Amino acid sequence: MTLSDHEKYMHLALEQARLAEAAGEVPVGAVVVDEHGELLAAAHNSPVARHDPTAHAEILALRAAGLRRANYRLSGATLYCTLEPCIMCAGAIVHARIRTLVFGSRDLRFGGVRSKFALADSDLLNHQVTVVEGVLGDVCAAMLQRFFAGKRPAGS
């Protein structure tokens, strides 16, 4: 896929992030696209609403894509997410056999793909994901910064 394709799908992930933010969740969105460019699934963070620590955007999108394909293996698919996946999500991405992961901004605190760990493309595992980072990264980071700035008391 080209950079313009990556940006197109990242915009869809950003739409999902906006839905998360509107629901009071950390604004992270994800979409899964098959090798032909067909949208398989879209999801956003909802661990608070679902009372589920695993309800990250990536996990929910992978689950929905697996149901749609009737297969837990998503070989050939690309996962787009607005924030670098955590180690839980990175592990699920590898298990799902995602071909390519495209993310917007790094997660310097919990990132499992580049910032803290390099799980998705580790040569220690039997599947390596191609990782593309920084697609619309400034937009993704700004959304998160605005969200968290609104959570902090004024002057802090």
Image (tube, rainbow, N blue to C red):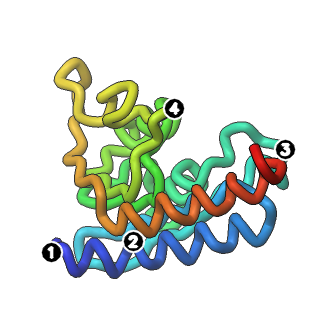
Residue type for callout 3: His
| Residue underneath mark 1 | 2
Residue type for callout 4: Arg
Q: Which mark is residue 109?
A: 4
Q: Nearer the viewer, residue 26 or 51?
A: 26
Which label lies toward us, 3 or 4?
4
- In the rendered structure, the answer to whether residue 90 lies left or right of residue 43 reads left
| Residue underneath mark 2 | 10
Q: Nearer the viewer, residue 150 or 69?
A: 150
Quarter occupied by the C terminus: top right
- In the rendered structure, the answer to whether residue 149 lies left or right of residue 60 reads right
Residue 146, picture quadrant: bottom right
Upstream in sequence: badge 4 or badge 2: 2
Is residue 80 in sight in this rendering? yes
CA–CA distance between discs 3 and 1? 37 Å
Upstream in sequence: badge 2 or badge 3: 2
Upstream in sequence: badge 3 or badge 1: 1
CA–CA distance between discs 1 and 2? 12 Å
- Placement of 55 over or under 35, stated as above or below: above
Mark 3 residue crowding within 10 angstroms, few (<14) / some (14–19) / many (20+): few
Local SS, label 4: loop
Which label lies toward us, 4 or 2?
4
Whole-percent x, y for residue 26 in the image: 68, 54
Q: Which mark is residue 51?
A: 3
Residue type for callout 1: Thr
Upstream in sequence: badge 3 or badge 4: 3
Q: Pointers 2 and 3 in contact (CB under 8 A)? A: no
Residue type for callout 2: Met
Whole-percent x, y for residue 22 in the image: 76, 72
